[in-house]
Amino acid sequence: MNPMIRVEQALLLTGTVLLGTYLTVSAHSVVSAHLAAWHFDDATETRGQTQLIPEEPPGFSRWAESRVVAYKRSLLEWATPAMALLRIERLGLRVPIFEGTNELVLNRGTGWIVGTAKPGEPGNVGIAGHRDGFFRVLQDLQSGDRVEVVTRAATLAFIVDAIAIVDPSDTYVLDPGDTPSLTLVTCYPFYFVGSAPQRFIVHASIVETVDRNANALSAAAVVAGRSQEDMR
């Protein structure tokens, strides 16, 4: 065989392998970006079957470039299911909540602060996020805004009633109160260069709990009722 033909065949094979690898990694990134929230978003009824709406990719326009890179890298490194989903519809925020607050967790989503109440439990639920990533939008949050935490069992709705800037040592913000509550924590100032010296705190009190299973049963009953009417 002509040596030049062998070289061309080898180059073609190498290119095919590299392209396949690239497509596999890219597909894995896209799929991973959707998996975390599939179990927690609102169910929709389509032809009588429940389908789950996937997590929308985050908007990176206000993120730090280094945080965008860290987020995309985390998609390939993270496989642990989320505990819950955090939603602030007015700000367009929909982000998974994972257990703990290490760097990988906060690159992938937000983190439940160990020692506080878990999402769905009575008490004060503490959630941390990076100021230059998912939680950058908190700078636009206002008192009265609705914040939702979606677990496998229920959707819990909270209303923001206090926003404060405190020192890192002011851990009292995570203490439980008289009613179930939610506390969001991020560093401050939002665009500070280096290690930010303060903490931006959002406190919200619960106003509503909707049992997801009850909703599913109600939807099924409606569908069943319509089927019976159609048969008459």
Image (cartoon, grey):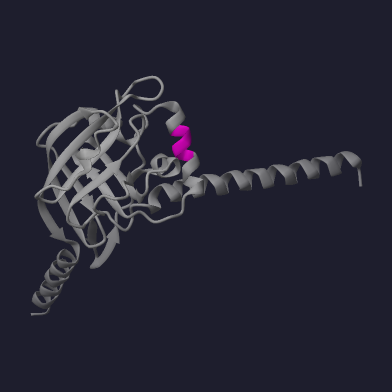
Q: Write the residue at 28% across / 44% down.
A: 127
Q: Is residue 35 magenta?
A: no
Does 156 appear above or below 219?
Answer: above
- x%, y% of residue 180? 14, 51
Chief SS of the magenta region = helix
Q: Is residue 135 visible?
A: yes
Q: Write the residue at 7% across / 80% down.
A: 232
**Residue at far top of view:** 193
Does 198 appear above or below 70?
Answer: above
* Residue nearest the viewer, comparing 31 with 226: 31
* Residue nearest the viewer, comparing 2 with 181: 181
| Quarter holding residue 14 | top right
Determine whether, in the image, residue 2 is placed left or right of residue 136. Answer: right
Q: Is residue 55 visible?
A: no
- x%, y% of residue 70? 47, 36
Determine whether, in the image, residue 23 is placed left or right of residue 1. Answer: left
Does 137 appear above or below 104?
Answer: above
Determine whether, in the image, residue 20 is placed left or right of residue 79. Answer: right
- x%, y% of residue 102? 42, 43
- x%, y% of residue 7? 84, 40
Determine whether, in the image, residue 79 is placed left or right of residue 62. Answer: right
| Quarter holding residue 39 | bottom left
Does 124 appear above or below 218?
Answer: above
Give the magenta range. Answer: 68-72
